């Protein structure tokens, strides 16, 4: 199918490039779009595939059970003592991205995101 003058990837094509069964759009940090090993901080459910096809609002695919871990990984203390291995620019961009999900859901912004974003 065509969209915006480009051929959209089908679900089958998208599944070729996944990590944990998720496309790159489900991650707050994507180092190299072609290398799933560089994708970090998953925070969407698999229903994101439907959102990418325009069949569902992407905000409805946020995995709120995973969000605290993604947020914690951005903090200096990290998640379970491990901070995400990313550049300061990637951390800032991820914090802004995650904060945007909290704002759109009218949820209180975690202190970590408030400090970074």
Image (cartoon, rainbow, N blue to C red):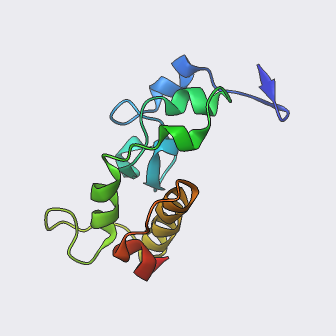
Q: Residue at the left extreme? A: 81
Where residue 43 sits: x, y (%)?
Answer: 40, 47
Work out whether residue 3 or residue 72 is closer to the camera in this orientation and state it.
Answer: 72
Q: Residue at the bottom extreme? A: 115
Where residue 57 sits: x, y (%)?
Answer: 62, 37
Q: Residue at x 18, y 66 (%)?
A: 82
Tell me: residue 25, above or below residue 30: above
Is residue 57 in view from this perspective?
yes
Q: Residue at x 43, y 42 (%)?
A: 44
* Residue 91 image-quadrant placement: bottom left
Work out whether residue 9 or residue 71 is closer to the camera in this orientation and state it.
Answer: 71
Q: Quadrant of the N terminus?
A: top right
* Residue 22 image-quadrant placement: top left
Q: Residue at x 40, y 42 (%)?
A: 36
Work out whether residue 38 or residue 64 is closer to the camera in this orientation and state it.
Answer: 64
Tell me: residue 114, above or below residue 32: below
Q: Residue at x 61, y 30 (%)?
A: 56
Q: Residue at the right extreme? A: 5
Number of residue marks:
0
Work out whether residue 87 or residue 52 is closer to the camera in this orientation and state it.
Answer: 52
**13 on left or right of 28:** right
Where residue 15 sits: x, y (%)?
Answer: 47, 24
Where residue 107 sits: x, y (%)?
Answer: 46, 60
**71 on left or right of 54:** left
Is residue 85 in view from this perspective?
no
């Amino acid at each position: 199918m065509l969209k915006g003058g480009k051929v959209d990837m089908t679900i089958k094509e998208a599944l070729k490039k996944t990590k944990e069964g998720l496309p790159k759009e489900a991650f707050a940090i994507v180092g190299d779009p072609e290398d799933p090993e560089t994708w970090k901080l998953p925070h969407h459910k698999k229903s994101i595939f439907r959102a990418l096809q325009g069949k569902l609002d992407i905000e409805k695919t946020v995995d709120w059970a995973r969000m605290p871990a993604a947020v914690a990984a951005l903090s200096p203390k990290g998640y379970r003592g491990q901070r995400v291995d990313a550049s300061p620019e990637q951390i800032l961009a991820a914090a802004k991205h995650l904060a945007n999900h909290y704002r759109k859901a009218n949820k209180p912004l975690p202190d970590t995101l408030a400090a970074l974003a």
